[in-house]
Amino acid sequence: MRIVDHVAMLDEDGVRLGEAAGRAGLDAPVPTCPGWRIRDLLHHVGGVHRWAAAHVATGRRRPFSAGEEAMFFTIVDDDELLDWFREGHRALVKTLGSADAGIECWAFLPAPSPLAFWARRQAHETAVHRADAESATGTVPHWAPSFAADGIDELLGGFFGRPGGRLVADPPASLALVPTDVDAAWTLYVEPSGRRLVAGEQPAQLTVAGPASELYLLLWNRTGTERLDLRGDSAVLDLWRARAVVTWS
């Protein structure tokens, strides 16, 4: 996907997130994020949007310290929180949409350019949290297969393509993901020392097939398997749910 496409999706999903949050109300529990209420979700995403925009707007070459990050997550009164979220979202869309394509700044996943990284990352950050907001209203979003497949690729090849982390298994486990509405597939091998990703469907302990949007939500632990076809050992999903922890660094 192009940068402009990611920015467009960031724009749309941020608006939808705000609408769902408004319908649910700040006190509504967020079923996909146990322990959170809508106010927690808005505070988190609003802070992340400001944090991301600051890297691009300033051309910052290194990550913010924990103390510096805190300034993006300031406590906001309830009667101002939704507007604060929307303001940060609009500013991020504007920053990414107007940035020079050759800007140099810090990024934490491989990408064609720093701007491409931030546009893609924030598009998917916002899409997944839109699903959280909608879960508080009893609805589930659906994305175009191409966008959902892009998100799966970022998660598997980007976040879990890095060394380290908790997602390991001894004995090894394997998971094949096969969208039924887009020409793409992935097979992930979880091994004692890390992970290995292969493009395409390969023999695996568990194969999960279905719409790309449903696979996207499943891998981000935002939905169950009711609308998916599972073939093989479902315990592989238990491993994923317990150990697939995403971090920024």
Image: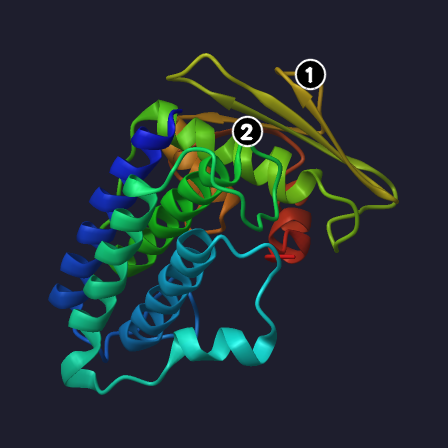
- Residue 72: x percent and y percent? 41, 73
Number of the label disc, if any, that sits on residue 226: none
Q: Say whether disc 2 or disc 1 marks the residue closer to the N-terminus.
A: 2
**Which residue: 42% across, 66% down?**
33
**The residue tagged with tag 1: helix, strand or loop?**
loop
Query: Which residue is at the far top?
Result: 183
Above or below for 227 versus 2 = below
Q: Report crowding for label 1: few under 14, some 14 to 19, many 20 or more residues within 10 A (C-alpha).
A: some
Number of the label disc, if any, that sits on residue 202: 1
- Residue 74: x percent and y percent? 37, 82
Quadrant that contains the N terminus: top left
- Residue beneath label 2, please? 112
Above or below for 72 versus 102 = below
- Residue 217: x percent and y percent? 42, 43
**Which residue: 29% across, 33% down?**
143
Give the label, 2 or 1, closer to the camera.
2
Task: Give the residue type at disc 1.
Answer: Gln
Query: Can residue 3 be spotted in the picture?
Result: yes
**The residue tagged with tag 2: helix, strand or loop?**
loop
Using the numbered discs, state the Cα–Cα distance from disc 2 to disc 1 in whole angstroms: 27 Å
Front residue (pair 122, 22): 122
- Left/right placement of residue 68 relative to residue 167 reads left
- Left/right placement of residue 73 relative to residue 5 reads right
- Left/right placement of residue 137 relative to residue 243 reads left
Query: Can residue 225 be spotted in the picture?
Result: no
